[in-house]
Image (tube, rainbow, N blue to C red):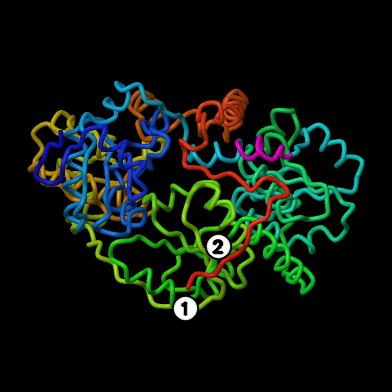
Amino acid sequence: MTRHSEYGSAIPLSDLLNWLEDGEELAFIDIREEGLYGDDHPLLAVNAPYSLMENQFPALVPRANTRTVLLAENTARGERAAGRLSVLGYSDIHVLDGGIGAWEQAGLPLFKGVNVPYKAFAELIEHFHHTPAIEPGELARLIEQQGDYVLLDSRTVEEYDRFHVPSAISVPSAELLYRFDDLVPSPDTLVVVSCAGRTRGIIGAQTLINAGVPNQVLALSGGTQGWRLADLATVQDGARYFQPQSEVAVQSARQRASGLAQRYEVQYIDGAILRQWQQDGNRTTYVFDVRNSDEYRRGHRADARWVPGGQLVQALDKWVGTRGGRIVLNDNDGVRATTTAHWLLQLGWQCYVLAGIDEGSRPPSHILPPPLVPRIDAAAARHRLENGTIGLSADRSWDYRRYHPAGTHWVNRSRLDNVPDLIGNAREILVFAEQPALAHGVVMDLIDAGFNATAVEGKRQDWLAAGLELHSSSQTPGDNLQIDFLFWLHDRHEGNAAASAAYLAWEADLPHQVGDPAKAHFKLGPADGDAGGPANIH
Protein backbone atom coordinates (compact mmCIF):
# COMPACT_ATOMS: atom_id res chain seq x y z
CA MET A 1 0.00 0.00 0.00
CA THR A 2 1.36 3.41 -0.99
CA ARG A 3 1.61 5.91 1.88
CA HIS A 4 1.72 9.61 1.04
CA SER A 5 3.75 12.24 2.87
CA GLU A 6 4.22 15.97 2.36
CA TYR A 7 6.93 15.53 -0.29
CA GLY A 8 6.27 12.17 -1.95
CA SER A 9 4.85 8.71 -1.56
CA ALA A 10 6.37 5.86 0.43
CA ILE A 11 5.92 2.84 -1.82
CA PRO A 12 6.05 -0.86 -0.96
CA LEU A 13 8.88 -3.03 -2.22
CA SER A 14 6.56 -4.78 -4.67
CA ASP A 15 6.00 -1.51 -6.56
CA LEU A 16 9.73 -0.88 -6.84
CA LEU A 17 10.41 -4.39 -8.13
CA ASN A 18 7.69 -3.98 -10.76
CA TRP A 19 9.02 -0.60 -11.84
CA LEU A 20 12.53 -1.97 -12.24
CA GLU A 21 11.22 -4.39 -14.86
CA ASP A 22 8.46 -2.45 -16.66
CA GLY A 23 10.76 -0.86 -19.26
CA GLU A 24 9.81 2.72 -18.39
CA GLU A 25 12.29 5.32 -17.19
CA LEU A 26 13.20 4.98 -13.52
CA ALA A 27 15.83 6.58 -11.32
CA PHE A 28 16.55 4.18 -8.45
CA ILE A 29 18.83 6.23 -6.18
CA ASP A 30 20.49 5.03 -2.98
CA ILE A 31 21.01 8.20 -0.90
CA ARG A 32 23.08 6.57 1.85
CA GLU A 33 26.70 7.65 2.24
CA GLU A 34 29.37 5.90 0.16
CA GLY A 35 30.61 3.67 2.96
CA LEU A 36 27.13 2.34 3.73
CA TYR A 37 26.29 1.99 0.04
CA GLY A 38 29.56 0.18 -0.63
CA ASP A 39 28.95 -2.30 2.17
CA ASP A 40 25.64 -3.50 0.74
CA HIS A 41 23.25 -2.22 -1.92
CA PRO A 42 20.88 -3.53 -4.59
CA LEU A 43 22.62 -4.25 -7.89
CA LEU A 44 20.81 -1.58 -9.93
CA ALA A 45 20.78 1.19 -7.30
CA VAL A 46 22.82 4.30 -8.15
CA ASN A 47 24.53 6.13 -5.30
CA ALA A 48 23.95 9.85 -4.72
CA PRO A 49 24.73 10.41 -1.03
CA TYR A 50 22.50 12.76 0.91
CA SER A 51 25.54 14.80 1.96
CA LEU A 52 25.97 15.88 -1.70
CA MET A 53 22.42 15.52 -2.96
CA GLU A 54 21.91 18.99 -4.45
CA ASN A 55 25.37 18.81 -6.02
CA GLN A 56 25.11 15.38 -7.68
CA PHE A 57 21.45 14.65 -8.26
CA PRO A 58 20.67 17.08 -11.12
CA ALA A 59 23.41 15.63 -13.34
CA LEU A 60 22.40 12.05 -12.57
CA VAL A 61 18.68 12.73 -13.02
CA PRO A 62 18.42 15.79 -15.29
CA ARG A 63 14.68 15.63 -15.98
CA ALA A 64 12.59 17.00 -13.10
CA ASN A 65 9.54 14.80 -13.74
CA THR A 66 11.51 11.54 -13.85
CA ARG A 67 9.91 8.72 -11.90
CA THR A 68 12.33 8.36 -8.98
CA VAL A 69 12.61 6.01 -6.01
CA LEU A 70 14.91 6.90 -3.11
CA LEU A 71 16.51 4.17 -1.02
CA ALA A 72 17.53 5.37 2.45
CA GLU A 73 18.40 3.87 5.82
CA ASN A 74 14.75 4.24 6.80
CA THR A 75 11.56 5.85 5.54
CA ALA A 76 11.98 9.08 7.51
CA ARG A 77 15.43 9.82 6.07
CA GLY A 78 14.14 9.09 2.60
CA GLU A 79 11.25 11.51 3.06
CA ARG A 80 13.63 14.21 4.29
CA ALA A 81 15.66 13.80 1.09
CA ALA A 82 12.48 13.85 -0.99
CA GLY A 83 11.68 17.22 0.54
CA ARG A 84 15.06 18.57 -0.52
CA LEU A 85 14.50 17.35 -4.09
CA SER A 86 11.06 18.95 -4.23
CA VAL A 87 12.74 22.31 -3.56
CA LEU A 88 14.82 21.70 -6.71
CA GLY A 89 11.67 21.12 -8.73
CA TYR A 90 11.48 17.30 -8.79
CA SER A 91 7.84 16.26 -8.97
CA ASP A 92 7.66 12.43 -9.10
CA ILE A 93 9.66 11.34 -6.05
CA HIS A 94 8.93 8.15 -4.14
CA VAL A 95 10.60 6.57 -1.12
CA LEU A 96 10.99 2.84 -0.55
CA ASP A 97 8.94 2.22 2.58
CA GLY A 98 11.19 0.71 5.23
CA GLY A 99 14.38 1.73 3.43
CA ILE A 100 17.23 -0.74 3.01
CA GLY A 101 15.70 -2.87 5.76
CA ALA A 102 12.72 -3.70 3.54
CA TRP A 103 15.07 -5.00 0.84
CA GLU A 104 17.05 -7.07 3.37
CA GLN A 105 13.95 -8.53 5.04
CA ALA A 106 12.68 -9.72 1.66
CA GLY A 107 15.89 -11.72 1.26
CA LEU A 108 16.85 -9.91 -1.94
CA PRO A 109 20.55 -9.88 -2.91
CA LEU A 110 22.87 -7.09 -1.80
CA PHE A 111 26.27 -6.31 -3.29
CA LYS A 112 29.49 -4.89 -1.89
CA GLY A 113 31.63 -2.33 -3.72
CA VAL A 114 30.92 0.40 -6.25
CA ASN A 115 30.21 0.33 -9.99
CA VAL A 116 29.20 -3.30 -9.45
CA PRO A 117 27.14 -3.89 -12.64
CA TYR A 118 29.98 -2.70 -14.83
CA LYS A 119 32.67 -4.73 -13.11
CA ALA A 120 30.40 -7.78 -13.18
CA PHE A 121 29.84 -7.16 -16.88
CA ALA A 122 33.56 -7.27 -17.63
CA GLU A 123 33.87 -10.59 -15.80
CA LEU A 124 30.93 -11.99 -17.77
CA ILE A 125 32.53 -10.76 -20.99
CA GLU A 126 35.71 -12.63 -20.10
CA HIS A 127 33.68 -15.82 -19.64
CA PHE A 128 31.56 -15.21 -22.76
CA HIS A 129 34.48 -14.51 -25.12
CA HIS A 130 37.24 -16.38 -23.23
CA THR A 131 39.31 -13.19 -23.25
CA PRO A 132 42.96 -14.32 -23.05
CA ALA A 133 45.28 -13.01 -20.32
CA ILE A 134 48.95 -12.98 -19.43
CA GLU A 135 50.30 -13.45 -15.90
CA PRO A 136 52.53 -10.73 -14.41
CA GLY A 137 55.56 -12.99 -14.21
CA GLU A 138 55.34 -13.89 -17.88
CA LEU A 139 55.06 -10.22 -18.87
CA ALA A 140 58.02 -9.40 -16.61
CA ARG A 141 60.13 -11.92 -18.54
CA LEU A 142 59.07 -10.35 -21.85
CA ILE A 143 60.08 -6.92 -20.54
CA GLU A 144 63.44 -8.20 -19.31
CA GLN A 145 64.13 -9.99 -22.60
CA GLN A 146 62.98 -6.95 -24.63
CA GLY A 147 60.55 -9.14 -26.54
CA ASP A 148 58.27 -8.03 -29.36
CA TYR A 149 55.39 -6.70 -27.30
CA VAL A 150 53.51 -3.47 -26.61
CA LEU A 151 51.98 -2.77 -23.19
CA LEU A 152 49.02 -0.38 -23.28
CA ASP A 153 47.78 1.08 -19.98
CA SER A 154 44.04 1.70 -20.42
CA ARG A 155 43.48 3.70 -17.22
CA THR A 156 43.10 7.47 -17.12
CA VAL A 157 46.23 9.57 -17.59
CA GLU A 158 46.01 10.68 -13.94
CA GLU A 159 46.07 7.06 -12.74
CA TYR A 160 48.95 6.24 -15.09
CA ASP A 161 50.99 9.18 -13.81
CA ARG A 162 50.69 7.97 -10.20
CA PHE A 163 52.28 4.61 -11.06
CA HIS A 164 52.35 2.07 -13.88
CA VAL A 165 53.99 -1.14 -15.02
CA PRO A 166 57.43 -0.53 -16.57
CA SER A 167 57.38 0.12 -20.35
CA ALA A 168 53.62 0.82 -20.39
CA ILE A 169 52.23 3.45 -22.76
CA SER A 170 49.29 5.52 -21.50
CA VAL A 171 46.33 4.87 -23.81
CA PRO A 172 42.97 5.39 -22.04
CA SER A 173 40.42 2.77 -23.11
CA ALA A 174 38.51 4.71 -25.75
CA GLU A 175 41.78 5.57 -27.52
CA LEU A 176 42.94 1.96 -27.94
CA LEU A 177 41.32 1.21 -31.29
CA TYR A 178 41.45 4.85 -32.41
CA ARG A 179 45.27 4.96 -32.27
CA PHE A 180 46.07 1.29 -32.69
CA ASP A 181 48.07 1.36 -35.94
CA ASP A 182 50.37 4.10 -34.60
CA LEU A 183 50.94 2.20 -31.35
CA VAL A 184 51.31 -1.25 -32.91
CA PRO A 185 52.74 -0.97 -36.45
CA SER A 186 53.51 -4.71 -36.85
CA PRO A 187 50.84 -7.45 -36.89
CA ASP A 188 53.37 -9.79 -35.25
CA THR A 189 53.70 -7.70 -32.06
CA LEU A 190 52.05 -9.08 -28.92
CA VAL A 191 49.63 -6.54 -27.44
CA VAL A 192 49.00 -6.48 -23.67
CA VAL A 193 46.31 -4.26 -22.15
CA SER A 194 46.60 -3.30 -18.48
CA CYS A 195 44.48 -1.45 -15.93
CA ALA A 196 44.35 -1.16 -12.13
CA GLY A 197 42.58 -4.49 -11.61
CA ARG A 198 40.57 -6.50 -14.10
CA THR A 199 37.70 -4.52 -15.64
CA ARG A 200 39.37 -2.13 -18.09
CA GLY A 201 42.05 -4.65 -19.02
CA ILE A 202 39.44 -7.21 -20.04
CA ILE A 203 37.24 -4.66 -21.82
CA GLY A 204 40.21 -3.01 -23.54
CA ALA A 205 41.64 -6.29 -24.80
CA GLN A 206 38.25 -7.55 -25.94
CA THR A 207 37.55 -4.24 -27.72
CA LEU A 208 40.58 -4.79 -29.93
CA ILE A 209 39.66 -8.43 -30.48
CA ASN A 210 36.05 -7.53 -31.34
CA ALA A 211 37.31 -4.95 -33.82
CA GLY A 212 39.43 -7.55 -35.59
CA VAL A 213 42.98 -6.29 -35.11
CA PRO A 214 45.46 -8.83 -36.55
CA ASN A 215 47.63 -9.07 -33.43
CA GLN A 216 47.45 -11.43 -30.51
CA VAL A 217 45.88 -9.39 -27.69
CA LEU A 218 46.02 -10.27 -23.99
CA ALA A 219 44.80 -8.63 -20.78
CA LEU A 220 47.33 -8.30 -17.94
CA SER A 221 45.93 -10.52 -15.21
CA GLY A 222 45.15 -8.36 -12.18
CA GLY A 223 46.52 -5.17 -13.74
CA THR A 224 48.80 -3.06 -11.58
CA GLN A 225 47.44 -4.73 -8.44
CA GLY A 226 48.27 -8.18 -9.77
CA TRP A 227 51.71 -6.89 -10.76
CA ARG A 228 52.43 -5.69 -7.22
CA LEU A 229 51.03 -8.87 -5.69
CA ALA A 230 53.60 -10.75 -7.78
CA ASP A 231 56.30 -8.71 -5.95
CA LEU A 232 57.01 -6.67 -9.06
CA ALA A 233 57.59 -2.92 -8.83
CA THR A 234 55.53 -0.27 -10.55
CA VAL A 235 57.20 2.96 -11.64
CA GLN A 236 56.41 6.66 -11.83
CA ASP A 237 59.12 7.64 -14.29
CA GLY A 238 59.62 6.82 -17.97
CA ALA A 239 56.10 8.00 -18.77
CA ARG A 240 55.02 7.46 -22.38
CA TYR A 241 51.84 8.79 -23.94
CA PHE A 242 50.03 8.29 -27.23
CA GLN A 243 51.02 10.73 -29.96
CA PRO A 244 49.00 12.63 -32.60
CA GLN A 245 47.21 10.28 -34.94
CA SER A 246 48.61 9.49 -38.40
CA GLU A 247 46.43 9.31 -41.49
CA VAL A 248 47.05 5.57 -41.72
CA ALA A 249 45.73 5.10 -38.19
CA VAL A 250 42.73 7.33 -38.95
CA GLN A 251 41.62 5.26 -41.92
CA SER A 252 42.27 1.93 -40.21
CA ALA A 253 40.37 2.95 -37.08
CA ARG A 254 37.36 4.12 -39.08
CA GLN A 255 37.26 0.90 -41.06
CA ARG A 256 37.46 -1.28 -37.96
CA ALA A 257 34.85 0.82 -36.13
CA SER A 258 32.52 0.40 -39.10
CA GLY A 259 32.85 -3.34 -38.82
CA LEU A 260 32.22 -3.14 -35.09
CA ALA A 261 29.07 -1.11 -35.72
CA GLN A 262 27.78 -3.70 -38.16
CA ARG A 263 28.33 -6.63 -35.82
CA TYR A 264 26.81 -4.94 -32.78
CA GLU A 265 24.09 -2.92 -34.53
CA VAL A 266 25.30 0.45 -33.31
CA GLN A 267 22.83 3.16 -34.37
CA TYR A 268 23.77 6.64 -35.60
CA ILE A 269 21.82 9.88 -35.33
CA ASP A 270 22.30 13.44 -36.53
CA GLY A 271 21.95 16.78 -34.76
CA ALA A 272 18.31 17.20 -35.80
CA ILE A 273 17.32 13.95 -34.12
CA LEU A 274 19.19 14.93 -30.96
CA ARG A 275 17.40 18.30 -30.83
CA GLN A 276 14.07 16.53 -31.23
CA TRP A 277 14.88 14.17 -28.37
CA GLN A 278 16.03 17.01 -26.13
CA GLN A 279 12.70 18.79 -26.63
CA ASP A 280 10.78 15.75 -25.39
CA GLY A 281 9.83 16.57 -21.81
CA ASN A 282 8.89 12.97 -21.04
CA ARG A 283 12.16 11.27 -21.95
CA THR A 284 15.71 11.71 -20.69
CA THR A 285 18.63 12.19 -23.06
CA TYR A 286 22.25 12.23 -21.87
CA VAL A 287 24.97 13.57 -24.17
CA PHE A 288 28.63 12.68 -23.55
CA ASP A 289 31.76 13.70 -25.41
CA VAL A 290 34.06 10.66 -25.26
CA ARG A 291 37.24 12.15 -26.76
CA ASN A 292 40.33 13.00 -24.72
CA SER A 293 40.37 16.07 -22.48
CA ASP A 294 42.63 18.19 -24.72
CA GLU A 295 40.27 17.80 -27.67
CA TYR A 296 37.27 18.60 -25.50
CA ARG A 297 38.89 21.78 -24.21
CA ARG A 298 39.61 22.95 -27.77
CA GLY A 299 35.93 22.77 -28.66
CA HIS A 300 32.82 20.72 -27.90
CA ARG A 301 29.05 20.72 -28.02
CA ALA A 302 27.67 22.99 -25.33
CA ASP A 303 25.21 20.26 -24.30
CA ALA A 304 27.83 17.51 -23.99
CA ARG A 305 29.55 16.52 -20.75
CA TRP A 306 33.08 15.22 -21.05
CA VAL A 307 33.58 11.64 -19.91
CA PRO A 308 36.27 9.42 -21.47
CA GLY A 309 34.57 6.52 -23.18
CA GLY A 310 36.39 3.88 -21.17
CA GLN A 311 35.23 5.44 -17.91
CA LEU A 312 31.60 5.27 -19.03
CA VAL A 313 31.93 1.52 -19.51
CA GLN A 314 33.82 1.21 -16.22
CA ALA A 315 31.49 3.34 -14.08
CA LEU A 316 28.40 4.55 -15.95
CA ASP A 317 26.50 5.02 -12.69
CA LYS A 318 28.72 8.00 -11.85
CA TRP A 319 27.06 9.95 -14.68
CA VAL A 320 23.74 8.25 -15.51
CA GLY A 321 21.01 7.74 -12.93
CA THR A 322 17.92 7.17 -15.07
CA ARG A 323 17.42 3.64 -16.36
CA GLY A 324 15.64 3.67 -19.71
CA GLY A 325 17.04 7.06 -20.71
CA ARG A 326 18.81 7.61 -24.01
CA ILE A 327 22.59 7.96 -24.11
CA VAL A 328 24.16 9.85 -27.02
CA LEU A 329 27.93 9.58 -27.50
CA ASN A 330 29.66 12.34 -29.43
CA ASP A 331 33.12 12.55 -31.00
CA ASN A 332 34.72 13.93 -34.14
CA ASP A 333 34.39 10.92 -36.47
CA GLY A 334 32.42 8.25 -34.62
CA VAL A 335 35.27 5.84 -33.85
CA ARG A 336 35.59 6.32 -30.09
CA ALA A 337 31.84 6.75 -29.72
CA THR A 338 31.25 3.49 -31.59
CA THR A 339 33.72 1.47 -29.53
CA THR A 340 32.07 2.81 -26.36
CA ALA A 341 28.52 2.34 -27.66
CA HIS A 342 29.02 -1.30 -28.58
CA TRP A 343 29.67 -1.99 -24.88
CA LEU A 344 26.88 0.19 -23.49
CA LEU A 345 24.39 -1.57 -25.78
CA GLN A 346 25.48 -4.92 -24.32
CA LEU A 347 25.11 -3.42 -20.86
CA GLY A 348 21.44 -2.97 -21.73
CA TRP A 349 21.32 0.79 -22.38
CA GLN A 350 19.77 2.68 -25.28
CA CYS A 351 22.89 4.17 -26.81
CA TYR A 352 23.47 6.13 -30.02
CA VAL A 353 26.40 7.72 -31.84
CA LEU A 354 26.50 11.34 -33.01
CA ALA A 355 29.63 11.96 -35.06
CA GLY A 356 30.94 15.49 -35.61
CA ILE A 357 31.56 18.33 -33.19
CA ASP A 358 28.89 21.03 -33.47
CA GLU A 359 28.85 23.50 -30.60
CA GLY A 360 25.09 23.30 -30.26
CA SER A 361 23.04 25.10 -27.64
CA ARG A 362 22.45 23.59 -24.24
CA PRO A 363 18.95 22.16 -23.77
CA PRO A 364 16.79 23.94 -21.18
CA SER A 365 16.93 22.60 -17.64
CA HIS A 366 13.97 22.55 -15.30
CA ILE A 367 16.12 21.81 -12.25
CA LEU A 368 16.24 24.76 -9.87
CA PRO A 369 19.48 25.76 -8.13
CA PRO A 370 19.75 24.85 -4.44
CA PRO A 371 18.81 27.55 -1.93
CA LEU A 372 21.54 29.99 -0.96
CA VAL A 373 22.97 29.70 2.53
CA PRO A 374 24.67 32.34 4.74
CA ARG A 375 28.45 32.45 4.17
CA ILE A 376 31.44 34.23 5.66
CA ASP A 377 35.14 34.25 4.86
CA ALA A 378 37.84 32.54 6.93
CA ALA A 379 39.02 35.74 8.62
CA ALA A 380 35.53 36.50 9.93
CA ALA A 381 35.19 32.88 10.98
CA ARG A 382 38.37 33.06 13.04
CA HIS A 383 37.07 36.13 14.86
CA ARG A 384 33.76 34.43 15.70
CA LEU A 385 35.47 31.23 16.87
CA GLU A 386 37.64 33.28 19.21
CA ASN A 387 34.44 34.72 20.67
CA GLY A 388 32.80 31.41 21.48
CA THR A 389 31.12 30.34 18.24
CA ILE A 390 31.10 26.56 17.73
CA GLY A 391 32.77 25.15 14.61
CA LEU A 392 31.77 22.00 12.75
CA SER A 393 33.62 20.28 9.91
CA ALA A 394 31.52 18.64 7.18
CA ASP A 395 34.54 17.40 5.23
CA ARG A 396 34.93 13.77 4.31
CA SER A 397 35.78 11.82 7.43
CA TRP A 398 39.16 10.76 6.05
CA ASP A 399 40.01 14.35 5.19
CA TYR A 400 38.98 15.46 8.68
CA ARG A 401 41.45 12.98 10.12
CA ARG A 402 44.21 14.52 8.00
CA TYR A 403 43.48 18.14 8.98
CA HIS A 404 40.66 20.36 10.19
CA PRO A 405 40.32 23.75 11.88
CA ALA A 406 41.29 23.35 15.54
CA GLY A 407 38.32 22.79 17.83
CA THR A 408 35.84 21.82 15.11
CA HIS A 409 33.72 18.69 15.49
CA TRP A 410 33.19 16.33 12.56
CA VAL A 411 29.63 15.89 11.28
CA ASN A 412 27.96 14.24 8.33
CA ARG A 413 24.73 15.60 6.90
CA SER A 414 23.08 12.19 7.32
CA ARG A 415 23.98 12.20 11.03
CA LEU A 416 23.07 15.59 12.50
CA ASP A 417 21.08 14.24 15.43
CA ASN A 418 24.08 14.69 17.74
CA VAL A 419 24.58 18.40 16.97
CA PRO A 420 22.80 19.60 20.13
CA ASP A 421 25.27 17.57 22.21
CA LEU A 422 28.22 19.04 20.29
CA ILE A 423 27.26 22.70 20.59
CA GLY A 424 25.87 22.85 24.12
CA ASN A 425 24.41 26.31 24.75
CA ALA A 426 26.12 27.97 21.78
CA ARG A 427 23.83 30.17 19.74
CA GLU A 428 25.80 30.17 16.48
CA ILE A 429 27.40 27.42 14.38
CA LEU A 430 30.08 27.74 11.68
CA VAL A 431 30.43 24.89 9.16
CA PHE A 432 33.74 24.26 7.36
CA ALA A 433 34.35 22.02 4.32
CA GLU A 434 36.83 22.24 1.47
CA GLN A 435 34.05 21.01 -0.84
CA PRO A 436 31.46 23.81 -0.51
CA ALA A 437 28.51 21.53 -1.26
CA LEU A 438 29.24 19.48 1.87
CA ALA A 439 29.09 22.56 4.10
CA HIS A 440 26.04 24.01 2.33
CA GLY A 441 24.00 20.83 2.82
CA VAL A 442 24.74 20.75 6.54
CA VAL A 443 23.92 24.45 6.91
CA MET A 444 20.59 24.04 5.09
CA ASP A 445 19.52 21.21 7.37
CA LEU A 446 20.68 22.97 10.53
CA ILE A 447 18.76 26.12 9.60
CA ASP A 448 15.66 24.03 8.94
CA ALA A 449 16.12 22.50 12.40
CA GLY A 450 16.15 25.97 13.99
CA PHE A 451 19.90 26.56 14.40
CA ASN A 452 21.79 29.72 13.45
CA ALA A 453 24.28 28.19 11.01
CA THR A 454 26.73 29.74 8.53
CA ALA A 455 29.08 28.19 5.95
CA VAL A 456 32.75 29.21 5.97
CA GLU A 457 34.24 29.87 2.55
CA GLY A 458 37.64 28.72 1.38
CA LYS A 459 39.97 25.75 1.55
CA ARG A 460 42.91 24.70 3.66
CA GLN A 461 45.23 27.42 2.38
CA ASP A 462 42.59 30.10 3.02
CA TRP A 463 42.06 28.92 6.58
CA LEU A 464 45.80 28.97 7.25
CA ALA A 465 46.16 32.42 5.67
CA ALA A 466 43.43 33.71 8.00
CA GLY A 467 45.40 32.48 11.00
CA LEU A 468 43.29 29.43 11.78
CA GLU A 469 45.24 26.56 13.31
CA LEU A 470 44.78 23.14 11.71
CA HIS A 471 44.86 19.89 13.65
CA SER A 472 44.90 16.22 12.67
CA SER A 473 43.23 13.28 14.42
CA SER A 474 44.22 9.79 13.35
CA GLN A 475 41.42 8.07 15.27
CA THR A 476 38.60 10.64 15.09
CA PRO A 477 36.03 10.04 13.83
CA GLY A 478 36.23 6.35 14.73
CA ASP A 479 36.14 3.73 12.02
CA ASN A 480 32.57 2.81 12.93
CA LEU A 481 31.44 6.39 12.30
CA GLN A 482 33.05 6.75 8.87
CA ILE A 483 29.89 6.08 6.90
CA ASP A 484 31.29 8.04 3.93
CA PHE A 485 34.40 5.88 3.46
CA LEU A 486 34.69 2.35 2.06
CA PHE A 487 37.87 1.03 3.64
CA TRP A 488 38.48 -2.15 1.69
CA LEU A 489 38.02 -0.38 -1.64
CA HIS A 490 40.51 2.42 -0.96
CA ASP A 491 43.17 0.53 0.99
CA ARG A 492 44.20 -1.43 -2.08
CA HIS A 493 45.70 1.74 -3.59
CA GLU A 494 47.74 2.40 -0.44
CA GLY A 495 49.97 -0.66 -0.75
CA ASN A 496 47.68 -2.98 1.25
CA ALA A 497 48.38 -6.35 -0.40
CA ALA A 498 45.60 -8.14 1.45
CA ALA A 499 43.07 -5.50 0.30
CA SER A 500 44.30 -5.83 -3.31
CA ALA A 501 44.03 -9.61 -3.23
CA ALA A 502 40.54 -9.41 -1.71
CA TYR A 503 39.47 -6.86 -4.33
CA LEU A 504 40.66 -8.99 -7.27
CA ALA A 505 38.92 -12.04 -5.81
CA TRP A 506 35.74 -9.98 -5.35
CA GLU A 507 35.82 -8.89 -9.01
CA ALA A 508 36.37 -12.43 -10.26
CA ASP A 509 33.45 -13.73 -8.17
CA LEU A 510 30.90 -11.17 -9.40
CA PRO A 511 29.41 -13.38 -12.16
CA HIS A 512 28.58 -15.96 -9.50
CA GLN A 513 27.00 -13.28 -7.31
CA VAL A 514 24.94 -11.78 -10.14
CA GLY A 515 23.82 -15.14 -11.54
CA ASP A 516 21.60 -14.72 -14.59
CA PRO A 517 22.95 -11.74 -16.64
CA ALA A 518 19.34 -10.77 -17.38
CA LYS A 519 18.99 -9.70 -13.72
CA ALA A 520 21.39 -6.88 -14.53
CA HIS A 521 19.63 -6.24 -17.87
CA PHE A 522 22.78 -7.25 -19.79
CA LYS A 523 22.47 -8.23 -23.48
CA LEU A 524 25.69 -10.04 -24.24
CA GLY A 525 26.68 -10.68 -27.84
CA PRO A 526 26.89 -11.30 -30.61
CA ALA A 527 29.07 -14.33 -30.17
CA ASP A 528 32.15 -14.65 -32.34
CA GLY A 529 31.21 -14.98 -35.98
CA ASP A 530 27.69 -13.53 -35.71
CA ALA A 531 26.84 -10.53 -37.86
CA GLY A 532 24.50 -7.63 -37.33
CA GLY A 533 24.01 -4.39 -39.17
CA PRO A 534 24.32 -0.65 -38.48
CA ALA A 535 21.36 1.64 -38.67
CA ASN A 536 20.62 5.33 -38.90
CA ILE A 537 17.73 6.82 -36.93
CA HIS A 538 15.39 9.03 -38.96
Read off the magenta span: 124-131
Q: Where is residue 534 in the image (x, y as percent from the top left)?
A: 60, 64
- Report the disc number at residue 359: 1
On screen, residue 70 versus residue 521, left or right, reads: left
Q: Is residue 5 above or below residue 533?
A: above
Three-letter residue code for mark 1: Glu
Which residue is the site of mark 2?
290
Q: In this view, does 113 lie above or below 323?
A: above
Mark 1 secondary-structure assignment = loop
Viewport quadrant of the N terminus: top left
On screen, residue 504 versus residue 271, left or right, reads: right
Which residue is painted at 82% across and 47% down in the image? 216
On screen, residue 322 versus residue 187, left or right, reads: left
Three-letter residue code for mark 2: Val
In this view of the protein, which residue sits in the foreground, 323 or 267? 267
Which residue is painted at 39% across and 56% down in the image? 325
Q: Position of residue 276 (x, y in %)?
A: 37, 73
Do we see residue 11 in this rendering?
Answer: yes
Q: Where is residue 92 in the image (x, y as percent from the top left)?
A: 21, 51
For marks 2 and 1 on the same chain, the one whose residue lies earlier in the sequence: 2
Which residue is painted at 31% across and 27% down in the image? 103
Is residue 130 one of those drawn in magenta?
yes
Which residue is painted at 17% across and 41% down in the image? 80
